[in-house]
Amino acid sequence: MDITTSIAGIKLKHPVFNAAGPICTTKEELDAIGASAASAIVCKTMTKEPRKGNPEPRYADFGRNSINSMGLPNPGYKAYMALLPQLARHEKPIIASFIGMTLEDSLEIVAGLNEVKEIAAIEMNLSCPNLPGKPQVAYDFQRSGEVLAEVGKIIRKPWGVKLPPYFDEVHFKLIADILNGSTIQFVSVINSPGNGLVIDRDKEQVAIRPKQGFGGIGGPAIKPFGLANARKMRQLLKPKTSVVGVGGITTGGDVFDYILAGADAVQVGTAFMQEGPGVFGRLAAELEEVMTAKGYSRIADFRNKLKEW
Ligand SMILES: Cc1cc2nc3c(=O)[nH]c(=O)nc-3n(C[C@H](O)[C@H](O)[C@H](O)COP(=O)(O)O)c2cc1C
C-alpha cells in the first residue's frame, strides 16, 4: 500500500494533516502536531501584529460540528519566523498560514516568511477584512485578483490560498479564472462557512459570545460544501494546481471521498479539536482500510475518478 501524495511539488507521506487554526498556535501545540502522524504541520493564521482575539467563549461544539469566532488570536508573524524553524526536527513539511489586514501587511509578512528556509510552503488565508461595506476579500473578486497579483510578485516559496466556500456557479468560475491567472500552486477549500448560528436551547442563548453569536461552522455539517468546492476547483483550475480538501472530515471514508472528488490531500480542523492529535493516524489508517476493501493500492488509482451519471 502506497498512500504518498504531493501538493505544490511537496511530497507527503500520506494525505492527512491539520487545518490552520485549531490547536496550532503555540510551540507546544505545533510540536504535538509534529509528533503526531500528521503528514505536514500548518500553523495558526498569523497576522502582522500579535492579536488576543475575541472574548470567550468563542468556540463551541455542537455534536461533531463546531462554531467559532476566534478573531485570529496569534503572536504575530515575527514570533512565527522564530518559532517555525524549531519544528524542523519533526522532518515534515511546515506550511505557514498568514492573513493581511491590508495588502501592505501581506507584503510585509511574505517578505519575512520568504527568508525562513524551514518553511516549505505558504498558505494565504483570503478570508481577510476588506474596505468597510465590502465583503471579505475572497468574496470580492476584483480585490482578490489584485491581492493575488501583488503577493505573487514578491513571494518566493510554493504558495496557495485558503478560500471560503462558494455556492454559485458564476462565483466558482470567477475565482477559478483569477487563480488560473495567478502564480499559486495549491488551493485549500474550504474555510468555515461564515455567519452560522448555534443556540443553546437550555439557556435560550447563543453558543458563543462574539458577534452576537454568529460564527464559522466546521464539522460534518459542511462536508457537502467542502466536497463541492474541492471538486469544482479540480475541474476548473489548471491540472498542475494542487487541491487540498477541508471540511467535515471525521473518517477515512471522508478522506477517500475528497480524493475521489479530486483532492490531492486533506486538512482536518474540528475533528482534531474534538479528538486530539491521534486523529491524523486514525484517518490515515482508515483510508488504507477503505482502499484495501476496494482493491486500490495507490492514491492515483482513485484520485479525481468520481463517476457521474
Ligand atoms: C477553532 C477554529 C479556528 C480556526 N482558525 C482558522 C485560521 O486561523 N485560519 C484558517 O485558514 N482557518 C481557520 N479555521 C478553519 C479551519 O481551518 C477549517 O477550514 C474549517 O474548520 C473546516 O474544517 P473542519 O470541518 O475539519 O473543521 C478555524 C477553525 C476552527 C474550528
Image: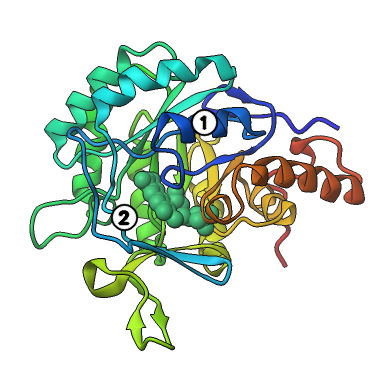
**Residue 197: where, in percent of width, then height?**
36, 76
Q: Residue 70 carries which label?
A: 2
Alpha carbon of mark 2 to alpha carbon of mark 1: how far?
A: 20 Å
Q: Is residue 289 left or right of residue 281?
A: right
Q: Residue at x 52, y 28 (%)?
A: 31
Q: Which image quadrant: the N terminus?
A: top right
Q: Residue at x 30, y 71 (%)?
A: 214
Closest to the observer: 39 or 193?
A: 39
Residue drawn at x 62%, y 47% is 262
Of tags 2 and 1, the one toward the viewer is 2
Q: Is mark 2 within 8 Å of ligand 1?
A: yes
- SS under mark 2: loop
Image side of residue 43 versus residue 82, left or right = right
The residue where tag 1 is placed is 41
- For label 1, the SS is strand
Q: Is residue 66 left or right of residue 92?
A: left
Q: In this view, does 277 lie above or below 270?
A: above
Q: In this view, does 72 lie above or below 171?
A: above
Looking at the image, can residue 129 be seen?
Answer: yes
